[in-house]
Amino acid sequence: MMSMTKKGTDSVRVAVVGGGAAGMMAAIFAARAGADVTLFERNDRMGKKLRITGKGRCNLTNNCELNEFLANVPTNPRFLYAALASFSTADTMAFFEEAGVPLKTERGKRVFPMSDKAGDIVAALEKQCIRAGVHILHRRVDELLIRDGTVYGVRCGTVEETVDAVIVCTGGRSYPTTGSDGDGYRFATAAGHTVIPTQPSLVPLVAHGSLCAAMQGLSLKNIGFCIKDEASGKTVYEDFGEMMFTHFGLTGPVVLSASAHLHEMHPEKYAAYIDLKPALDEKTLDARIRSDFAKYQNRDFLNALDDLLPQKMIAPMVRLCEIDPRKKVHSVTREERERLVRCLKALKIPIRGFRSIDEAIVTRGGVNIKEINPKTMESKRISGLYFAGEVLDVDAYTGGFNLQIAFSTAVAAGTAAANVAQSGTKTGKNG
């Protein structure tokens, strides 16, 4: 039989399901608040997904104020207000600094460990779990035990463990090889919760045609980027920054953030438009091109664009603007120059769909937040049942926002679960 190390006969017993960012933080704060905590992690080590975030550097939060933070949360930002107000980005930074992880703030207010090692963040969380007295079991929870509207335990295989509260921190469906394969949604559904259908968010985009493949591996910096709904002509996302062409389409920071805005995805609904020269208006850009053409007046058009474009982009762009590649630049007409300017200012990439959820950084959708108390993260349907992190229907842009959501909701859930007896759940209250 599994057993927990008792802090005392009156200690609230809390089971935390999932040993990722939210799970470890929830366990720490529940234990610090006096609960007897067992953390169940199905993998052989903690924080498997956390170790690969930010390309292994771990962008753990964003050093911004609350209103700016919420502006970067496209899905249900108001739900997060109380949790973020109680455990802010500054609180997260202080937590890790005090845990022995020096931090630094980079462009876009993104916060990383000074070492650039995600493993340092995982190690700090593990150490704080141990210091707080959290009992860690590397076992998969198969079922939540619920009776009369109250959760009373968890089942791992044939073994049942009785507890006073359960915090579900199982993540979403992104990166399923790390263990995030949807267990939390199954638990929520079995408990009577509504689960908003999931889809990938912060995910690369698949493009129509062969243009992107022709420029595969080419990274662009300081470009303007927008996505339009082709039927309405409405711009649904606009940004400035970095991106990359791949064999299937587009990826990179602005692309991943854009994906969070795309709903009801189907072929031909959306197109991306890339402004390769955002610092120049069309008139100024045309003057720049005429200057280059004067400089290379005896060259073929194909060989006169080296100052204007990366080498890998020249041949595809020449084909796109439909100018004879062997035409001498002194013979290029004004109309042809205008076509080149339009291509440079609004390079159109028709979008066919998302890449697989396996490649998504986060999952959109999840447990319906209308059924969750925003201050405590407790279920409004089942007493003593809490949810934190990506399993909830909240998601944000890149920049450390999603991990902060995990930390803030986890602290709210852990603290509330440790006080579950005072709220009446331990005695069977149906909330």
Image (cartoon, grey):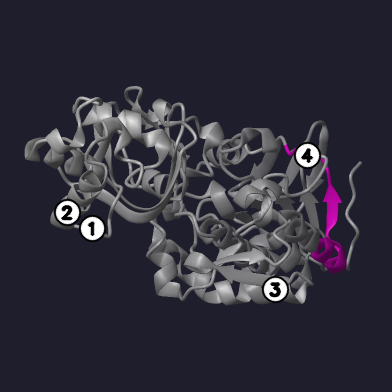
In this rendering, the answer to whether 123 lies above or below 203 is: below
Residue receiving disc 4: 43
- Alpha carbon distance from label 4 to label 1: 52 Å
Image coords of residue 83 (percent x, y): 52, 68
In this rendering, the answer to whether 136 lies above or below 199 is: below
Residue type at numbered disc 2 = Ala
Q: Which mark is residue 280?
A: 1
Q: For this view, does 129 lie left or right of residue 235?
A: right
Earlier along the polypeptide chain: callout 4 or callout 3? 4
The magenta segment is 127-141
Earlier along the polypeptide chain: callout 1 or callout 3? 3
Image coords of residue 44 (percent x, y): 83, 40
- Alpha carbon distance from label 4 to label 2: 60 Å
- Alpha carbon distance from label 4 to label 3: 25 Å
* Mark closer to the observer (4, 2): 2
Residues 132 and 285: in front is 285
- Alpha carbon distance from label 2 to label 1: 10 Å
Q: In the rendered structure, are the residues bearing label 4 and label 2 in contact, judged by CB atoms less than 8 Å apart?
A: no
> Residue 410 magenta-drawn?
no
Residue receiving disc 3: 95
Q: In the rendered structure, are the residues bearing label 2 and label 1 in contact, judged by CB atoms less than 8 Å apart?
A: no
Q: Which mark is residue 287?
A: 2
Image coords of residue 274 (percent x, y): 29, 44
- Hey, which quadrant is residue 419 in on the image? bottom right
- Hey, which quadrant is residue 214 in on the image? top left
- Alpha carbon distance from label 3 to label 2: 54 Å
Residue type at numbered disc 1 = Leu
Residue type at numbered disc 3 = Phe
Earlier along the polypeptide chain: callout 4 or callout 1? 4
Residues 393 and 232: in front is 232
Q: Which mark is residue 110?
A: none
